[in-house]
Image: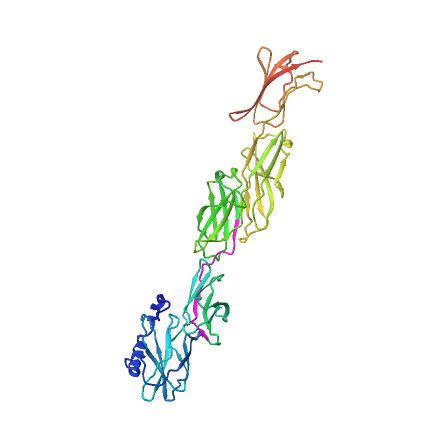
C-alpha cells in the first residue's frame, strides 16, 4: 500500500531518529529478518479496528484473540513509514496475551496513512500468520481564502466495504458538529461559507455497517484573511478647480486592506468603470478627477475595497455631482438641478448662492426642492450692478458622518448677462411747472460706466453727463433751448466692452 498523500511525507521527518533506531532494534530482537513471513506459531488474531484519537493524535489498534491457546504475547507492526513505499513490517511493541488493544502514542497520523497488523507469538517465540493490514484514515484540509472554502481530502478505510463517511467540523475549539454524510468512494468534500479569522478542525469518521467507527486524524486550519472594511462612506463629490471633481471617502479604520478602486459612471444604476487604484491615508481617500468636467455631468462615483484575492469586497455608497441648469426670462432666472446622491440619511438642505460680477457668493435661499426661481434681480433696479449674475448650489448632509464631519457638495456655476434697460421719452416740456421738466433715460440698473449726450440739429454738443442720475433741464448755456428736435446719445460700457449704445431724437415743447 502506497502513501495516500505523498506530498505530506516530509513533514514527518521531524519525528525523532531515536524512535526509528529503537523500532529497528526491537524488530531485529523479536522477529529477526523474517519481515512478517508465515511462521509455525499461533493462529492469527482478528484485527477489528484501527482508529485515531482526534484529541491526542494517538492511534488505537483493536483485535480479537488468536484462536490458539499457547499465545504468550502479541506483536504490533507498522507497515508503512515516511518515505518508504514498500511494507516494512517493523515491530512497535509486544503486548501481553490478555490484551486486545494497543495505543500507539508516537504515531504521526496527522501526516500520512499508516498500516498496522498484529501477530500472536507463543512461548517458543514462534509467530504465526499475521492479521490483515488495516490503515488509518488520513485527512487533509486546505483553506482557500479567495473562495472562503475548505477542501477536505481523505483516503478510504481500506478493510471495510459499504462504509459511510461522516464529516465533522469544529470552530474556535468548540465541540465537533456533523456537517455531512458521504458514501463510500467519495474522498473529497468542499466546505463553503467559511468564516474569516477562525480556527477550524476537521476529521472524517468511517462507519461500518456493523456499527464500528474509525476516525481520521483531525486537521486544523486558521482561516486568516485580511479584514475588510465594514463600511466605506462616500463623503462628497463636489466642484473642484477648473471644473474638475473632488471626491472624498471615509474608510473603516479597522480595515486591513490597502487596495481600493475608484469607479465612475454617468448613471447611478450601472456602467461603473474603474478610473483609479488608490491607497488610503489615515482611513481617508481624496481624489481629483481631472478628466471629468462637472459641467458635463452629473457623474457618479463609488469606491470598492479589493481583497487579497483581487476580488471586490465592500463598496461605498454613491457620491454624485450636482449639475445646475437655468434660463433667464426678462429679469426672472429659473434654476434647476439633479438631487445629490447618496448620503445614507439624505440631504439636509440645498443652499442657493448668488454673486454679481467678481463679488463673493451670497446665500439667497435654502430649499429641499431641486428648483428655484430668482425674482430678486428685478428688486435691484436703480442700484449699481455688474453686468453678470452667477449661481451655484450647495447640498448639505442630513447629519454628521462617522467622522463627525457634515458632508457637502457644490454644483457647477452658471452665469447670466444683465443688460440695463433704457426707457427714453420722445418729448419733454422744460417750462418749470414741475411736470416733465427734464429729459434723460430711465435705467433699470445703475451702470458703472455711463455717458449721456445731447446734440442740436447741426451736430453741436449742448449737454453731456456721466452721472446716471443727472438729467438735461432743456437749457443751452443757461438759456432755455428753443423748440426743436434734438439728438441724444447714450453709451453704457463695462471696461472695454460696450454693453448698451442707443441714439434717438427728443423734441423740446413749450405748451
Give the image location of residue 33, x and y in percent.
Answer: 28, 80
Relative to 231, is 187 above or below?
below
Give the image location of residue 144, x and y in percent.
Answer: 43, 60
Closer to us: 258 or 55:
55
Give the image location of residue 52, x and y in percent.
Answer: 42, 75
Colour mode? rainbow
Look at the image and tell me whether residue 106 can be seen: no
Residue stretch rendered in magenta on the structure: 213-234
Query: From the viewer's perspective, is 47 left or right of 366?
Result: left
Residue in view at x 39 percent, y 82 percent: 45
Give the image location of residue 486, x and y in percent.
Answer: 62, 14
Q: Quadrant of residue 105?
A: bottom left
Locate the C terminus by quadrant. Answer: top right
Magenta highlight on residue 129: no
Relative to 125, is 470 above or below?
above
Q: Quadrant of residue 53?
A: bottom left
Q: Quadrant of residue 204?
A: bottom left
Q: Furthest residue to the top?
A: 458
Residue in view at x 34 percent, y 87 percent: 122
Look at the image and tell me whether residue 349 can be seen: yes
- Total marks in image: 0
Locate the N terminus by quadrant. Answer: bottom left
Amino acid at each position: 500500500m502506497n502513501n495516500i498523500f505523498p506530498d505530506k511525507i516530509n513533514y514527518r521527518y521531524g519525528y525523532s531518529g531515536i524512535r526509528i533506531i529503537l523500532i529497528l532494534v526491537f524488530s531485529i530482537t523479536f522477529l529477526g529478518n523474517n519481515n512478517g513471513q508465515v511462521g509455525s506459531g499461533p493462529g492469527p488474531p482478528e484485527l477489528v479496528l484501527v482508529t485515531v484519537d482526534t484529541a491526542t493524535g494517538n492511534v488505537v489498534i483493536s483485535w480479537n484473540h488468536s484462536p490458539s491457546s499457547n499465545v504468550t504475547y502479541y506483536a504490533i507492526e507498522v507497515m508503512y513509514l515516511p518515505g518508504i513505499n514498500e511494507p516494512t513490517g517493523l515491530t512497535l511493541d509486544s503486548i501481553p496475551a490478555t490484551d486486545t488493544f494497543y495505543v500507539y502514542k508516537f504515531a504521526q497520523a496527522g501526516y500520512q496513512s499508516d498500516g498496522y497488523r498484529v501477530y500472536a507469538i507463543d512461548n517458543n517465540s514462534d509467530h504465526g500468520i499475521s492479521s490483515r493490514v488495516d490503515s488509518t484514515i488520513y485527512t487533509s484540509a486546505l483553506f482557500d481564502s479567495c473562495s472562503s472554502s475548505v477542501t477536505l481530502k481523505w483516503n478510504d478505510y481500506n478493510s471495510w466495504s459499504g462504509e459511510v463517511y461522516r464529516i465533522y467540523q469544529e470552530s474556535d475549539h468548540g465541540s465537533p458538529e456533523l456537517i455531512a454524510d458521504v458514501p463510500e468512494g467519495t474522498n473529497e468534500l468542499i466546505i463553503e461559507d467559511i468564516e474569516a479569522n477562525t480556527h477550524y478542525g476537521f476529521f472524517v469518521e468511517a462507519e461500518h455497517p456493523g456499527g464500528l467507527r474509525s476516525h481520521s486524524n483531525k486537521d486544523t486550519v486558521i482561516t486568516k484573511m485580511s479584514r475588510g472594511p465594514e463600511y466605506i462612506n462616500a463623503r462628497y463629490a463636489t466642484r473642484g478647480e477648473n471644473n474638475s471633481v473632488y471626491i472624498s471617502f471615509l474608510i473603516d479604520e479597522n480595515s486591513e486592506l490597502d487596495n481600493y478602486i475608484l469607479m465612475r459612471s454617468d448613471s447611478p444604476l450601472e456602467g461603473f468603470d474603474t478610473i483609479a487604484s488608490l491607497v488610503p491615508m489615515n482611513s481617508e481617500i481624496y481624489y481629483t478627477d481631472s478628466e471629468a468636467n462637472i459641467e458635463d455631468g452629473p457623474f457618479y462615483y463609488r469606491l470598492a475595497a479589493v481583497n487579497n484575492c483581487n476580488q471586490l469586497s465592500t463598496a461605498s455608497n454613491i457620491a454624485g455631482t450636482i449639475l445646475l441648469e437655468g434660463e433667464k426670462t426678462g429679469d426672472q432666472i429659473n434654476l434647476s438641478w439633479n438631487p445629490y446622491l447618496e448620503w445614507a440619511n439624505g440631504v439636509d438642505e440645498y443652499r442657493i448662492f448668488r454673486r454679481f460680477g467678481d463679488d463673493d457668493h451670497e446665500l439667497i435661499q435654502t430649499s429641499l426642492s431641486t428648483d428655484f426661481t430668482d425674482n430678486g434681480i428685478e428688486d435691484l433696479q436703480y442700484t449699481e450692478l455688474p453686468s453678470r449674475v452667477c449661481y451655484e448650489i450647495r447640498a448639505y448632509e442630513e447629519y454628521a458622518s462617522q467622522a463627525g464631519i457634515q458632508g457637502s457638495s457644490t454644483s457647477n456655476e452658471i452665469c447670466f448677462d444683465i443688460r440695463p434697460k433704457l426707457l427714453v421719452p420722445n418729448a419733454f416740456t422744460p417750462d418749470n411747472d414741475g411736470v416733465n421738466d427734464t429729459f434723460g433715460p430711465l435705467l433699470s440698473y445703475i451702470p458703472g460706466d455711463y455717458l449721456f449726450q445731447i446734440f442740436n440739429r447741426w451736430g453741436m454738443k449742448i449737454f453731456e453727463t456721466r452721472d446716471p442720475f443727472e438729467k438735461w433741464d432743456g437749457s443751452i448755456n443757461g438759456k432755455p433751448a428753443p423748440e426743436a428736435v434734438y439728438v441724444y446719445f447714450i453709451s453704457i460700457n463695462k471696461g472695454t466692452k460696450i454693453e448698451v449704445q442707443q441714439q434717438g431724437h427728443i423734441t423740446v415743447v413749450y405748451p
